[in-house]
Image (cartoon, helix red, strand yellow):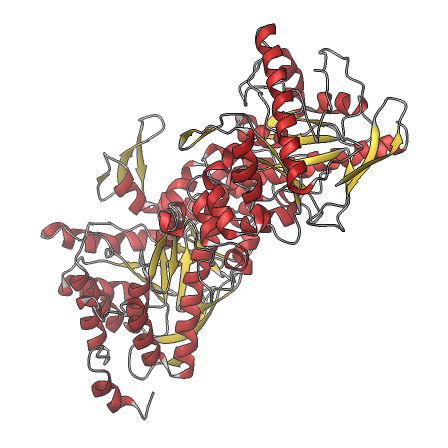
Amino acid sequence: MKFAVYLVAESSARLGSLTEFARIPEAVFETPLLLLHTRGASVPHLSYDLLQMVSTGHYMLQMPLVTLVDHTKNVKAFGKGIAEFAGLKIVDIGYHEKNSISPWTRGGRKLIDPQTYNISCIEALKPDMFQAIVDGDTTQSSSAKRVRKSVDVTVKFAGICADLKEKSDGSLSENLPRAFHGPITPIVLLKLVSKGIDILDGTFPWLVAERGSALVFPNSLSKENAPVTETLPSVKAPAVVATDQKVTKLADDNSNKEAVDRVYEINLKDKIYFSDTRPLLEGCSCYSCRKYSRNYVHHLTATGELQGPILIMMHNFHHYINSFKSIQQAIKDNE
Amino acid sequence: MTRHPLTFQVLAQCKTTKAKCSRMTLPHHVVETPVFMPVGTQGSLKGIVPEQLEQLNCQIMLGNTYHLGNRPGPDLLESCGGLHNFMGWSRNLLTDSGGFQMVSLLELAEITEEGVKFKSPYDGSECLLTPERSIEIQNAIGADIIMQLDDVVSSTVSGPRVEEAMHRTTRWLDRCLKAHKRPEAQNLFPIVQGGLDPKLRTESAKQLMDRDVAGFAIGGLSGGEGKDQFWKMVHLSTDLLPNDKPRYLMGVGFATDLVVCCALGCDMFDCVFPTRTARFGCALVETGQLNLKLKSFAQDFRPIDENCECSTCRRYTRAYLHTIATVETVACNLITVHNVAYQLKLMRNIRENILKGTFVDFIFNFMDTMYPKKDFPVWATDALRVVNIDLHERGSMHKHQQVDC
């Protein structure tokens, strides 16, 4: 795989592309790149057909190991890699894995060391890109010692993974893309891109959908500048890909940052939408907004119907994907 | 006689059984019968979007008045121009009266001549569902076919209560007809009752047939009664009800039941079974069900059904579905799509064989595939025998009909 930067803006934001993947040599992925989050190798709530109704573009999928590790031996028996196993042949062509050392799966705790990771997981699943396993078990309140240890362990693992990879097919990219993992709110997204991050994960739209909310933040070029309120973790770039993770808790995070960002979403569970006949977001061209109104989506979420999360996910992804396109355009136009 | 917003044209009649293939037109779309109607209880078919249903060529589906009457309620639905607009479904809808859910879901439902008295599950207040109120809600929902509020009695009950319910059902039908404000847009169907008593059922059918309606439903069955009594009441009902109006057998959806009841002369069916079982990870196939959660499917890389053309079978394997069944909601969407496809394909095969005059052979093949050990259910064998099909001695009865069929 090759990574090339072809434009760096004043802010340090960069435009680039990922090409020459071994499995799919003709594919080109523009960066900043959005990784679509998946669980069990499918985008949450969206089957292939529904995903096609959101966008027919090519996407790279992020596959957290924790949702797959129980099934690696079956995928290995299948023999053609996780993409085809999950019915994602032809359109969806790349993926990236993220995991912690001992993921908690439905079957309990599983221990993954670099050797196991490489042999059982990587060889079975055959991803186009994978991330070295990291010790991501730190939060904002971890002690300095714990954080140091996690970084040491991470670097060590990264080294082992890189060695194992080199032994198997000896290809390590020279120009290294920078990836950031973790749910990314719109403000953080802009800041990360402006610091030169190239690959970002798409967990955020899903997390918002899980709490019954639709993204409504403005995703085109006329954006206001939000004040910088938090510092970014530093980014390292050894081996293939490596990150420092700031692990944020799912959904019920009550920190100030989340409170500010809630302006950017509407919660369809709220009774105020009972008779609201507007689309989720006015002017949005996604399937959910073209066809349905807030009162129907409110009804679906209030009654616990599965179609609720489906419609919200379709909108959230569409919206988030479009915000990436706007960002790429803005970098090109130097805004 | 008023003009109903429904036409029913018999295209072919099976010469051996009572099955027929017909074409029904309703305000929103045409419906080919016999038809299976999937159930979208609360204004959506759980986990799939209307476009997927259209791709499967579903022409009519159900909504539940009890649920929709509570949430979002008739006022909102009316202001949106009805359930069709609200849920984005442009083909046909059928709503039930709400009576059945009320009696089965609520603990303290009490039936009086006025209506069904119950305690609201939301605030405990006393509510009353009358025939008038049921029709009012159904008028707001706007379905193409609406059902009368009937006095529902469990089929396991016997004695004077059954007769009381049968007569009351007729009286409630008249109240429903009077309260119906949109007869030019919505067809009101009565429901034949009478439990498992042939005399009562006959009386019920005769009374209902005296009213000017576009079609009839057969109710009070597919509850706890034994199958051997079930089929006899279906057979009796279809003998009585006119052939030129659709006959809707409520609550029937297992494949074998559908095939036999088509042979007995029913045209319309509904059931939650295929969509409900999908959510539990079970896929319907010609030989029964596959429980995809079983470890035996972990490395089964075939689709659910190699001959199925639904979008799930064209792209996904049993092994992959095994990994996500009941874990990820995507599995619900995928298996539901397949199960609905299976049901609709079964009905399409039934219709095509009736049209071609090969329905009898179809029944033999269907039964052989579903029961490879020839352990056909006794009730099915008995029921088919009265419509001139002997599953065990294939040649005997069929020969007499060969020239005709």
Between A218 and B320, the residue placed more toward the observer is B320
Between B80 and A249, the residue placed more toward the observer is A249
Q: Position of residue A153 (x, y in %)?
A: 59, 18
Task: Residue lying at the far bottom in this picture: please name it.
Answer: B403
Q: Position of residue A49 (x, y in %)?
A: 59, 51
Residue A262 visible in the displayed image:
yes
Identify whether A259 is placed above or below A330.
above
Identify whether A273 is placed above or below B145.
above
Q: Quadrant of residue B52?
A: bottom right
Please name the residue shown 43% across and 44% down the image. Answer: B325
Left or right: B356 as drawn, with respect to B380: right
Left or right: B16 as drawn, with respect to A92: left
Between B391 and A144, the residue placed more toward the observer is A144
Q: Quadrant of the N terminus of chain B?
A: bottom left
Q: Quadrant of residue A232?
A: top right
Please name the residue shown 30% across and 90% down the image. Answer: B402
Task: Residue lying at the far left in this picture: please name it.
Answer: B159
Q: Quadrant of the C terminus of chain B?
A: bottom left
